[in-house]
Image: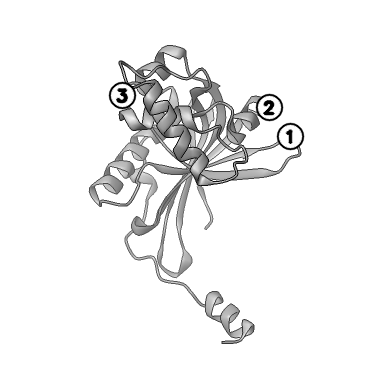
Amino acid sequence: MSDNDHLQQIAHLRREYTRGGLRREDLPADPLDLFEHWLDQAIAAQLPDPTAMCVATVDPQGQPWQRIVLLKQFDQRGMVFYTNLGSRKAQHLENNPRISLLFPWHMLERQVMVTGSVERLSMLEVMKYFHSRPRDSQLGAWVSKQSSRISARGVLEAKFLEIKQKFQQGEVPLPSFWGGYRIIMESVEFWQGGAHRLHDRFFYQRGVDGWEIDRLAP
Protein backbone atom coordinates (compact mmCIF):
# COMPACT_ATOMS: atom_id res chain seq x y z
CA MET A 1 0.00 0.00 0.00
CA SER A 2 1.39 3.39 -0.99
CA ASP A 3 1.62 6.28 1.47
CA ASN A 4 -1.14 8.05 -0.43
CA ASP A 5 -3.42 4.99 -0.25
CA HIS A 6 -2.75 4.71 3.47
CA LEU A 7 -3.64 8.38 4.00
CA GLN A 8 -6.82 7.95 1.99
CA GLN A 9 -7.76 4.91 4.06
CA ILE A 10 -7.35 6.88 7.28
CA ALA A 11 -9.28 9.85 5.86
CA HIS A 12 -12.29 7.65 5.16
CA LEU A 13 -12.49 6.04 8.60
CA ARG A 14 -15.78 7.19 10.08
CA ARG A 15 -19.05 5.90 11.48
CA GLU A 16 -22.50 7.24 12.16
CA TYR A 17 -23.49 8.15 15.72
CA THR A 18 -26.91 6.68 16.37
CA ARG A 19 -27.30 6.16 20.10
CA GLY A 20 -29.61 9.11 20.61
CA GLY A 21 -29.64 12.81 21.24
CA LEU A 22 -29.48 15.24 24.12
CA ARG A 23 -32.23 17.83 24.49
CA ARG A 24 -32.36 20.98 26.58
CA GLU A 25 -35.45 19.79 28.45
CA ASP A 26 -33.40 16.81 29.67
CA LEU A 27 -30.69 18.99 31.22
CA PRO A 28 -30.53 19.46 35.01
CA ALA A 29 -29.67 22.87 36.41
CA ASP A 30 -26.43 21.49 37.88
CA PRO A 31 -23.96 19.85 35.44
CA LEU A 32 -22.72 17.48 38.16
CA ASP A 33 -26.11 15.78 38.16
CA LEU A 34 -25.80 14.96 34.46
CA PHE A 35 -22.13 14.04 34.82
CA GLU A 36 -22.97 11.59 37.59
CA HIS A 37 -25.75 10.06 35.49
CA TRP A 38 -23.47 9.65 32.47
CA LEU A 39 -20.66 8.23 34.61
CA ASP A 40 -23.06 5.71 36.16
CA GLN A 41 -24.11 4.65 32.64
CA ALA A 42 -20.46 4.32 31.56
CA ILE A 43 -19.80 2.07 34.57
CA ALA A 44 -22.97 0.03 33.93
CA ALA A 45 -21.93 -0.40 30.28
CA GLN A 46 -18.64 -1.88 31.58
CA LEU A 47 -16.53 0.55 29.60
CA PRO A 48 -12.79 0.09 30.22
CA ASP A 49 -11.58 2.67 32.74
CA PRO A 50 -14.78 4.74 32.89
CA THR A 51 -13.14 7.21 35.29
CA ALA A 52 -10.17 7.82 32.97
CA MET A 53 -9.81 11.45 31.94
CA CYS A 54 -7.35 13.26 29.71
CA VAL A 55 -5.77 16.02 31.81
CA ALA A 56 -4.29 19.02 29.98
CA THR A 57 -1.85 21.45 31.57
CA VAL A 58 0.38 24.18 30.14
CA ASP A 59 4.10 24.64 30.72
CA PRO A 60 5.84 28.00 31.27
CA GLN A 61 6.51 28.29 27.51
CA GLY A 62 2.79 27.98 26.74
CA GLN A 63 3.09 24.41 25.44
CA PRO A 64 0.04 22.25 26.32
CA TRP A 65 0.68 18.71 27.61
CA GLN A 66 -1.83 15.87 28.07
CA ARG A 67 -1.97 12.58 29.91
CA ILE A 68 -4.57 10.10 31.19
CA VAL A 69 -5.36 10.25 34.92
CA LEU A 70 -8.11 8.55 36.94
CA LEU A 71 -10.85 10.61 38.57
CA LYS A 72 -11.06 9.59 42.23
CA GLN A 73 -13.82 11.77 43.65
CA PHE A 74 -16.25 14.52 42.72
CA ASP A 75 -18.79 16.64 44.56
CA GLN A 76 -19.97 20.24 44.64
CA ARG A 77 -16.45 21.36 45.55
CA GLY A 78 -14.95 19.91 42.35
CA MET A 79 -13.24 16.89 40.78
CA VAL A 80 -10.26 15.19 42.42
CA PHE A 81 -7.17 13.32 41.25
CA TYR A 82 -3.91 12.32 42.94
CA THR A 83 -0.33 12.47 41.70
CA ASN A 84 3.34 12.78 42.49
CA LEU A 85 3.91 16.45 43.34
CA GLY A 86 7.23 16.37 41.48
CA SER A 87 5.59 15.21 38.24
CA ARG A 88 5.46 17.31 35.09
CA LYS A 89 1.76 18.06 35.52
CA ALA A 90 2.23 19.11 39.14
CA GLN A 91 5.08 21.44 38.15
CA HIS A 92 2.88 22.96 35.47
CA LEU A 93 0.01 23.47 37.92
CA GLU A 94 2.27 25.16 40.45
CA ASN A 95 3.17 27.69 37.76
CA ASN A 96 -0.27 27.90 36.11
CA PRO A 97 -3.29 26.43 37.95
CA ARG A 98 -5.49 26.41 34.82
CA ILE A 99 -6.54 22.92 33.73
CA SER A 100 -8.80 21.06 31.30
CA LEU A 101 -10.26 17.54 31.59
CA LEU A 102 -11.83 15.32 28.94
CA PHE A 103 -13.80 12.12 29.57
CA PRO A 104 -13.86 10.16 26.26
CA TRP A 105 -16.72 7.68 26.52
CA HIS A 106 -16.48 6.63 22.86
CA MET A 107 -18.66 3.53 23.06
CA LEU A 108 -21.54 5.64 24.37
CA GLU A 109 -20.80 8.32 21.76
CA ARG A 110 -20.23 10.84 24.53
CA GLN A 111 -17.59 13.25 25.74
CA VAL A 112 -17.49 15.55 28.74
CA MET A 113 -15.03 18.44 28.85
CA VAL A 114 -14.30 20.40 32.04
CA THR A 115 -12.27 23.57 32.44
CA GLY A 116 -11.25 25.37 35.61
CA SER A 117 -8.39 25.82 38.05
CA VAL A 118 -6.91 23.61 40.75
CA GLU A 119 -6.32 23.79 44.46
CA ARG A 120 -4.09 21.42 46.45
CA LEU A 121 -5.85 18.92 48.68
CA SER A 122 -5.32 19.00 52.43
CA MET A 123 -2.89 16.56 54.02
CA LEU A 124 -5.82 14.85 55.75
CA GLU A 125 -7.63 14.23 52.45
CA VAL A 126 -4.46 12.91 50.82
CA MET A 127 -3.59 10.64 53.74
CA LYS A 128 -7.11 9.21 53.91
CA TYR A 129 -7.06 8.27 50.23
CA PHE A 130 -3.44 7.05 50.25
CA HIS A 131 -4.15 4.51 52.98
CA SER A 132 -7.22 3.26 51.13
CA ARG A 133 -5.05 2.15 48.18
CA PRO A 134 -3.75 -1.41 47.77
CA ARG A 135 -0.47 -1.84 49.64
CA ASP A 136 1.57 -2.40 46.44
CA SER A 137 0.16 0.86 45.02
CA GLN A 138 1.26 2.63 48.19
CA LEU A 139 4.75 1.16 47.76
CA GLY A 140 4.75 2.14 44.09
CA ALA A 141 4.18 5.77 45.04
CA TRP A 142 7.56 5.70 46.82
CA VAL A 143 9.39 4.17 43.87
CA SER A 144 8.94 6.57 40.99
CA LYS A 145 10.33 10.08 40.74
CA GLN A 146 7.62 10.75 38.19
CA SER A 147 8.60 12.26 34.82
CA SER A 148 12.35 12.03 35.57
CA ARG A 149 14.64 10.16 33.15
CA ILE A 150 15.67 6.59 34.07
CA SER A 151 18.11 4.24 32.37
CA ALA A 152 15.98 1.05 32.36
CA ARG A 153 12.87 -0.58 33.81
CA GLY A 154 15.12 -2.65 36.05
CA VAL A 155 15.86 0.50 38.05
CA LEU A 156 12.18 0.75 39.00
CA GLU A 157 11.85 -2.95 39.79
CA ALA A 158 14.95 -2.92 42.01
CA LYS A 159 13.70 0.18 43.81
CA PHE A 160 10.30 -1.43 44.38
CA LEU A 161 11.91 -4.46 46.04
CA GLU A 162 14.06 -2.15 48.17
CA ILE A 163 11.03 -0.14 49.32
CA LYS A 164 9.00 -3.30 49.93
CA GLN A 165 11.74 -4.58 52.20
CA LYS A 166 12.07 -1.23 53.97
CA PHE A 167 8.36 -1.03 54.81
CA GLN A 168 7.65 -4.73 55.29
CA GLN A 169 6.51 -4.12 58.85
CA GLY A 170 3.53 -1.91 59.68
CA GLU A 171 1.81 0.80 57.67
CA VAL A 172 3.35 2.34 54.57
CA PRO A 173 3.95 6.03 55.36
CA LEU A 174 2.61 8.78 53.11
CA PRO A 175 5.41 10.18 50.93
CA SER A 176 5.92 13.92 51.39
CA PHE A 177 6.02 14.30 47.59
CA TRP A 178 2.63 12.69 46.95
CA GLY A 179 -0.63 14.64 46.96
CA GLY A 180 -3.72 15.60 45.04
CA TYR A 181 -5.67 18.36 43.37
CA ARG A 182 -9.26 19.49 43.28
CA ILE A 183 -10.48 21.06 40.05
CA ILE A 184 -12.75 24.05 40.69
CA MET A 185 -15.03 23.76 37.71
CA GLU A 186 -15.74 26.87 35.65
CA SER A 187 -17.30 25.20 32.62
CA VAL A 188 -18.60 21.76 31.68
CA GLU A 189 -19.47 20.74 28.12
CA PHE A 190 -21.54 17.65 27.29
CA TRP A 191 -21.18 16.18 23.80
CA GLN A 192 -23.56 13.54 22.49
CA GLY A 193 -22.94 12.12 19.02
CA GLY A 194 -25.70 12.63 16.46
CA ALA A 195 -26.57 11.30 13.01
CA HIS A 196 -25.11 13.11 9.97
CA ARG A 197 -22.56 14.80 12.27
CA LEU A 198 -25.33 16.89 13.84
CA HIS A 199 -24.01 16.32 17.34
CA ASP A 200 -25.62 17.74 20.47
CA ARG A 201 -23.37 20.01 22.56
CA PHE A 202 -24.43 21.83 25.70
CA PHE A 203 -22.10 24.19 27.49
CA TYR A 204 -22.50 24.97 31.18
CA GLN A 205 -20.63 28.05 32.41
CA ARG A 206 -20.55 29.19 36.01
CA GLY A 207 -22.20 32.58 36.42
CA VAL A 208 -22.92 34.93 39.30
CA ASP A 209 -26.27 33.31 40.05
CA GLY A 210 -25.46 29.73 39.14
CA TRP A 211 -24.83 27.76 35.96
CA GLU A 212 -25.72 29.25 32.56
CA ILE A 213 -26.46 26.80 29.73
CA ASP A 214 -25.96 27.32 25.99
CA ARG A 215 -26.41 24.96 23.07
CA LEU A 216 -23.36 24.97 20.76
CA ALA A 217 -23.26 24.16 17.08
CA PRO A 218 -21.54 20.84 16.36
Mark nearer the N terminus (2 vs 3): 2
Amino acid on which the number 2 mark rests in the picture? Asn
The residue lying toward the viewer, choosing from 142 and 84, is 142
Q: Secondary structure at mark 2?
A: helix
Mark in the foreground, 3 or 1: 3
Residue where numbered disc 3 is placed? 132
Residue 143 at x, y = what percent? 48, 31
Rendered residue at 37%/20% (across/down): 167
Residue where numbered disc 1 is placed? 60
Residue 60 at x, y = what percent? 74, 34
Residue where numbered disc 2 is placed? 95
Amino acid on which the number 1 mark rests in the picture? Pro
Label 3 crowd (10 A; few <14 / some 14-19 / many >=20): few
Label 2 crowd (10 A; few <14 / some 14-19 / many >=20): few
13 up-or-down from 184: above or below = below
Rendered residue at 33%/51% (across/down): 48
Rendered residue at 52%/58% (across/down): 218
Give the alpha-carbon distance from disc 2 to disc 3, as whole Å.
30 Å
92 up-or-down from 103: above or below = above
Numbered tag placed on residue 2 in the rendering: none
Q: Are marks 2 and 1 in contact (CB under 8 Å)?
A: yes
The residue lying toward the viewer, choosing from 120 and 185, is 120
Q: Secondary structure at mark 3?
A: loop
Which quadrant of the rendered structure holds the N terminus? bottom right
